[in-house]
Image: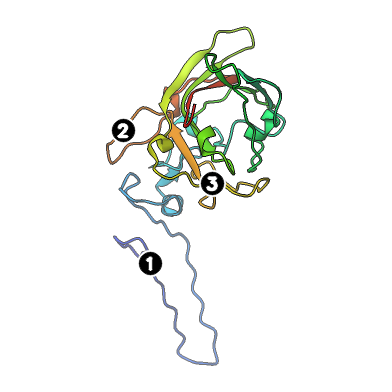
Amino acid sequence: MINISSNGYYIGIAVCANSNKNVATAEVSNIKLSRTCFSEGITKLQCDQSSNCESGQATGTCYNKGEVPPWESKTAATTIFDVGSTVTKFGCAGDGPSPNYAVDGTTHKTSCDRTNLLGQPAGLLIKPFHRVETKAEGLRIYADNNCPGCDPVSYIFEGRTSAESDWVEISRGDLPWKGSATYARNSVEGLDIPSTYGSASARFEFTEVSFYPPCDAPDCTRDPTVLSDYLEYKITWTETRNP
């Protein structure tokens, strides 16, 4: 039995036969690849390949084996507003396009007619179909096809734990595209948006904001335990590009 040790990440084993008529075989009982789990730049694949590390399911952060926080086991989703969610507009005149288009995962658009209602708040009430309390980590918005002036540029995002409880503010502020000098559009309606939990679709124009506290440290990780769980949500658009 021969033990092979290495300080590197990869180990190569070559097996040679002394005759081209015989088959050379080798038996390997155990290979362990270890590394510093919290090293800068480590990928999820490298983390999962290491015998002493494991990645968190929710954020992909690399931890020492056995030290993954319990909250990492919760599934991360592209959106907590699943298909079948009940979406209601408020502060709008008339019905207009269905508010469900706001969460259907396509470039179909909804809109809000503000005629004679500019002094009233406007936005969306959303009741997820799954009826499970969730943590909202951020807000991602895709541009419509032909109305740059209709883009919401400021918001208040709130949640509540039941239909009878008070709304609790989660986040408020300006959306990053508020200061944009150009207003690119998603010109075709009805296309599927293949976004993921970690990133938006680069094929489409969008803006997004995180609800996590600011952190500029190089080893900064997002800890969902700082966020509260809610059952229903409300988005109030406090300003559009062209009121």
One can see residue 67 in this view? no
- Which structural element holds mark 2? loop
Q: Earlier in the sequence, mark 2 or mark 1?
A: 1
In 3D space, how far apart are the residues under numbered discs 2 and 1 (Cα atoms)? 38 Å
What's under tag 1, amino acid-wise? Ile
Give how far apart the Cα atoms at labels 3 and 1 are. 50 Å
Q: Name the residue under label 2.
A: 215
Judged by depth in the image, the label closer to the viewer, 2 or 1, is 2
Which amino acid type is shown beneath numbered disc 2? Cys
Q: Which residue is drawn at 43% across and 22% down?
A: 172
Vertical arrangement, residue 157 with respect to residue 163, above or below: below
Give the mark toward the camera: 3 or 1: 3
Dot 3 amino acid type:
Arg
The residue tagged 3 is 185
Q: Which residue is drawn at 60% across and 17% down?
A: 91
Q: Where is residue 11 in the image (x, y as percent from the top left)?
A: 38, 66
What residue lies at 63% left-to-right and 43% top-to-bottom?
A: 107
**Which element type, helix, strand or loop, lies under badge 1?**
loop
**Quadrant of residue 5 within the rendered picture:** bottom left
Q: Quadrant of residue 146?
A: top right
In-front residue for pair 241/100: 241
> Does any portion of residue 27 appear in the rendered image?
yes
